[in-house]
């Protein structure tokens, strides 16, 4: 179609001038009717030919693109008779002095004046006449409508269709309702058509000259705009806002397409089926400029992915095929915040968290620190009661901080002395003791069944002792023969391979016992485990210990633990369920060692468990289930972390 013809068709569409096809049809009908009566005079024939030649200059070959107004006609093949007038109720905006139809005109009983009966088989009942169309009609949503807005709704076109929910077939518009005579329209046609001139990413009214960082997880709310990292609300969320400009005024259609870099994250079909947000707007999307030849595009149609580090270019193509692209690109990033909750009296809290922030920044997650808060000192968090108290104190302090203003994207990092778990009242028997010997016996602190060794619960909380009781019963004796051995006779023995305080055996003085052969039973409290950190599910809190195994933790070790525990807050290690990315190749859960979901990267696969000392030495990912000296995510966890959807925060 040539330039003149294209513009001609648009003008005809706007004013409702009859198309070439319609003129041809009318001519055929006239000839047929006249043939039944008499032949046209030569003078009449010449006059009609001249008129037809003139009108063919304005013949509309784009009838389907006419706008629809009051008085247009629709057709249903199952209604008898099949025609209905279109009645516009959605708008008072006029087209040719008649209400202009939009997609809101979809009530079959109100907006379509069907006067006949429904002949669809599903509506026929034995012995009863067909029901009136108006009694049974039920419609869906309009399709193939215009980008032009009538008020707040898209305008209808003759090509628009709407499904009937009774028959499953579409109702079609066969007449626009527009009525304009050729003599009423004065049209000026100029060439060439408008050509797209520029496309610019916007921050407000200001074009961005280069690549922009789009914080895709943060919802569009001015409270997140800090003027430093986030300089404008347009830099928030996945939806893009940009301006398209043509070289001259006039309404012009154009198509927009996002062009992704080849290095962007790729979501699998399974991931997309579980999380509808795992996508970006693919394919070409058509828009129309305003009358000034410009269009600010913003809304649900053009959006980038939720992944971090993805890069997109915006491409715009006009109807002549001219394509231009944004000078800069859009790079996706995630923004998170953290508040440190420090206990009074702690002296070894990490003062520099750059190891933590730098590692996440590698995976396109920016962690920005907010002013910290203080809470009362707790020597240990080891059981449910301790955890409840700890969380309550943190939440109270946090509520008064700036953290809630960044909700739900803020994590609380709480510090304590220990995260040690105590196992109480464990009996350890020592058989065939000969009482009265001057040589003490050495009892190893080990589970009598598994023979796994433990350290005594010693010097962790001053008010809690390792010693419960110790006694001797001669062979064949009963409780009545029990001889109590005082704590002063029982001396913990330091394991020289570990830090001072780590005692995993006890020396018992038996010199004062009767000279009988019997059994000594030592009942103690021991350390089940010492945790480096905790991530409290259902909250935004992680706990980091500053001491473990009677030794102050280094700043590097605390940063490693922070990376690990916040990883849990962000959905690591993914098990491939819900809205998370696919399960990683090195995933293991509590059934194979350590509580929670973890990663056994660089440990031999196929093991029954992954929590041995050798496993810890071989592990190479920060998401391994125990402190291993690693502060980086392995290649598999890195892929999942890049793809994780943080729109809901933590």
Image (tube, rainbow, N blue to C red):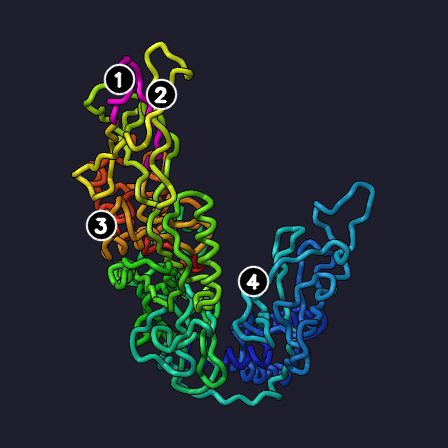
Question: Of label 2 and label 4, which has the lower sequence position?
Answer: 4
Task: Classify 10 Å Cα crowding around label 3: few (below 14), some (14-19), many (20 and above).
Answer: many
Of pointers 3 and 2, the one earlier in the residue sequence: 2
Q: Are marks 3 and 4 in contact (CB under 8 Å)?
A: no
Is residue 556 something one can see in this rendering? yes
Q: Nearer the viewer, residue 70 or 398?
A: 398
Q: 416 or 369: which is nearer to us?
A: 416
- Residue in view at x 28 percent, y 17 percent: 431
| Callout 2 secondary element | strand
Please determine whether, in this image, residue 147 is positioned above or below residue 193.
Answer: above
Q: Which residues are magenta?
A: 509-528
Position of 624 with respect to 69 (left or right) is left
| Quarter placement of the N terminus | bottom left
Q: Nearer the viewer, residue 194 or 12?
A: 194
Please indicate, yes or no, whether residue 604 appears anywhere in the rendered image: no
Separation (CA) of disc 3 from disc 4: 55 Å
Query: Dot 1 surroundings within 10 Å: few (below 14), some, or many (20 or more)?
Result: many
Circles 2, 1 touching at the beta carbon (< 8 Å): yes
CA gap, disc 2 and disc 1: 11 Å
Q: Mark 2 sits on what residue? A: 483
Please tell me which of labels 3 and 4 falls first in the chain.
4
Chain-order first, disc 3 or disc 1? 1
Secondary structure state at the residue bearing disc 3: loop
Q: Which mark is residue 435?
A: 1
Using the image, determine if residue 24 lies above or below residue 248: above
Residue found at x 33% / y 23%: 521
Instruction: Residue under label 3, please give it.
Output: 630
Q: Point out residue 241 in the picture as x, y percentages from the top left corner.
A: 42, 74
């Amino acid at each position: 179609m040539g330039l003149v013809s294209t513009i001609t068709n648009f003008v005809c569409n706007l004013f409702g001038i009859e198309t070439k096809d319609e003129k041809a049809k009318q001519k055929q009908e006239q000839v047929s009717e006249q043939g039944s009566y008499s032949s046209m005079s030569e003078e009449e024939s010449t006059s009609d030919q001249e008129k037809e030649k003139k009108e063919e200059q304005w013949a509309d070959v784009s009838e389907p693109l006419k706008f629809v107004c009051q008085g247009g006609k629709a057709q249903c093949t199952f209604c008898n008779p099949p025609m209905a007038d279109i009645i516009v109720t959605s708008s008072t905006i006029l087209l040719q002095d008649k209400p202009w139809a939009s997609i809101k005109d979809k009530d079959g009983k109100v907006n379509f004046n069907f006067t006949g009966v429904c002949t669809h088989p599903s509506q026929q009942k034995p012995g009863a006449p067909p029901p009136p169309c108006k009694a049974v009609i039920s419609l869906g949503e309009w399709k193939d409508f215009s980008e032009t807005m009538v008020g707040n709704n898209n305008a209808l076109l003759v090509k628009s269709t709407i499904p009937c929910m009774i028959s499953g077939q579409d109702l079609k518009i066969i007449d626009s309702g527009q009525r304009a005579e050729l003599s009423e329209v004065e049209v000026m046609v100029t060439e060439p058509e408008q050509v797209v001139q520029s496309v610019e990413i916007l921050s407000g009214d200001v074009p961005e000259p280069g690549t922009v960082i789009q914080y895709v997880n943060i919802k569009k709310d001015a409270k997140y705009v800090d003027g430093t990292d986030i300089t404008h609300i347009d830099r928030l969320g996945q939806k893009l806002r940009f301006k398209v400009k043509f070289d001259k005024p006039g309404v012009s259609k154009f198509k927009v397409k996002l062009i992704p870099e080849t290095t962007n994250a790729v979501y699998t079909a399974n991931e997309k089926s579980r999380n509808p947000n795992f996508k970006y707007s693919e394919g070409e999307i058509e828009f129309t400029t305003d009358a000034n030849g410009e269009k600010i595009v913003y809304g649900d149609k053009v959006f980038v992915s939720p992944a971090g580090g993805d890069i997109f270019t915006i491409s715009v193509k006009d109807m002549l095929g001219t394509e231009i692209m944004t000078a800069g690109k859009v790079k996706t990033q995630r923004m998170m915040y953290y508040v440190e909750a420090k206990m009074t009296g702690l002296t070894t809290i990490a003062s520099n968290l750059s190891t933590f922030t730098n590692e996440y920044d590698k995976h396109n997650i920016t962690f920005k620190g907010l002013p910290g808060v203080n809470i009362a000192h707790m020597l240990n968090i080891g059981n449910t009661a301790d955890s409840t108290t700890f969380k309550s104190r943190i939440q109270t302090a946090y509520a008064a901080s700036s953290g809630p203003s960044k909700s739900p994207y803020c994590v609380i990092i709480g510090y304590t002395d220990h995260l040690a778990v105590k196992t109480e009242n464990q009996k350890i028997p020592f058989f065939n003791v000969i009482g009265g010997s001057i040589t003490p016996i050495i009892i190893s602190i080990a589970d009598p069944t598994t023979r796994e060794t433990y350290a005594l619960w010693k010097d962790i909380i001053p008010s809690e002792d390792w010693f419960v009781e110790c006694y001797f019963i001669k062979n064949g004796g009963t409780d009545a023969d029990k001889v109590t051995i005082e704590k002063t006779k029982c001396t913990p023995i330091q394991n020289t391979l570990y830090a001072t305080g780590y005692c995993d055996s006890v020396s018992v003085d038996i010199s004062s016992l009767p000279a009988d052969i019997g059994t000594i039973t030592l009942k103690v409290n021991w350390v089940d485990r010492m945790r480096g950190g905790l991530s409290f599910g259902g909250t935004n809190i992680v706990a980091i210990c500053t001491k473990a195994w009677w030794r102050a933790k280094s700043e590097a070790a605390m940063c490693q633990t922070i990376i690990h525990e916040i990883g849990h807050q962000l959905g690591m290690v993914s098990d491939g369920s819900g809205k998370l990315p696919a399960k990683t190749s090195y995933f293991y859960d509590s059934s194979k060692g350590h509580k929670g979901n973890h990663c056994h990267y660089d440990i031999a696969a196929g093991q029954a468990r992954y929590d041995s000392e050798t496993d810890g030495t071989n592990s190479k990912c920060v998401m391994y289930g125990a402190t291993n000296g690693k502060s980086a995510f392995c290649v598999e966890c890195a892929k999942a972390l890049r793809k994780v959807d943080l729109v809901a925060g933590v």
